[in-house]
Image (spheres, rainbow, N blue to C red):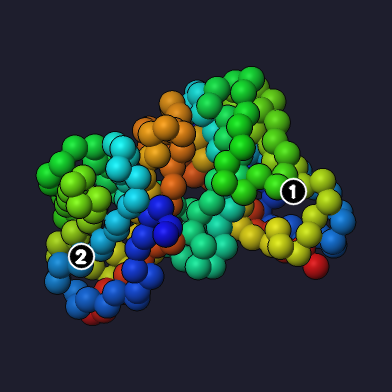
Amino acid sequence: QKEVEQNSGPLSVPEGAIASLNCTYSDRVSQSFFWYRQYSGKSPELIMSIYSNGDKEDGRFTAQLNKASQYVSLLIRDSQPSDSATYLCAVCIDNTDKLIFGTGTRLQVFP
Amino acid sequence: NAGVTQTPKFQVLKTGQSMTLQCAQDMNHNSMYWYRQDPGMGLRLIYYSASEGTTDKGEVPNGYNVSRLNKREFSLRLESAAPSQTSVYFCASSEVIGTDTQYFGPGTRLTVL
């Protein structure tokens, strides 16, 4: 089983809709979770970080963490075509202090 | 403030050739990382340096060596390139290891023939 799993997509949503991106992880002691956005041909950039159970909101983005279910998600409200990108989930494996990345979910927002 | 810079942007090698990928950051970060990204595989950690003077192996270190030249610079060397090392290589840095935000360079696209 991979340590961090994401559906590769593509996830297609209409402009203005809510996009929901999901990620599961296998390491029960993980404490730090990150969502990165990567446009085609570009480098990853941080969207959100979350460290405790519950929701964390930043503008149109909400990260949700459920450690009991080993599940982290990213909601994008009022999706725009400029949100079309690959979204990478990353989990810090505590006993190694290293980030493990999922393979990413490709999001397509159509006008 | 350039952030994280990488050279070269593109490189084509023949099997068996060697080369060094250069990375520098101007954010005074302590930790630096080298990743490779392959289609369908996501980002995989090759080597990292938690602080100046230390380096450690990541998930896929075979065939690579690194040098943390000083606090700013972290290089990745391929001693004898193989076609399996064809990939996009990203350098990243963070203030501290692990739990802190990592900032990525623009990447180097390497093809080994």
Residue B3 is situated, as x and y percent measured from the top left of the image, at: 50, 37
Residue at the spot 18% in from the left edge and 47% down from the top edge: A68
Crowd band around label 1 with a 10 angstrom C-alpha radius: few (<14), some (14–19), many (20+): some
Q: CA distance from mark 1 to mark 2?
A: 38 Å
| Residue type beneath disc 1 | Gly
Residue B51 is situated, as x and y percent measured from the top left of the image, at: 55, 22
Decide which of A41, A29 is in the foreground and name it: A29
Crowd band around label 2 with a 10 angstrom C-alpha radius: few (<14), some (14–19), many (20+): some
Residue at the spot 36% in from the left edge and 60% down from the top edge: A5
Q: Which mark is residue B63?
A: 1
Q: Which mark is residue A21?
A: none
Any part of residue A11 in sight: yes
Tell which subunit mark 1 falls on.
Answer: B
Residue B30 is situated, as x and y percent measured from the top left of the image, at: 51, 24
Q: Is residue A98 above or below residue A84?
A: above
For mark 2, give the secondary structure.
strand
Left or right? Give the position of A79 relative to B97: left
Q: Is residue B60 above or below residue A16?
A: above
For mark 1, give the secondary structure.
loop
Query: Do callouts 1 and 2 point to residues on the same chain?
Result: no
Decide which of A67, B13 is in the foreground and name it: A67
Residue A55 is situated, as x and y percent measured from the top left of the image, at: 13, 46
The quarter of the displayed image where residue B49 is located: top right
Q: Which residue is mark 2?
A: A20
Left or right? Give the position of A58 relative to B103: left
Residue at the spot 29% in from the left edge and 64% down from the top edge: A83
| Residue type beneath disc 2 | Ser
Left or right? Give the position of A95 relative to B69: left
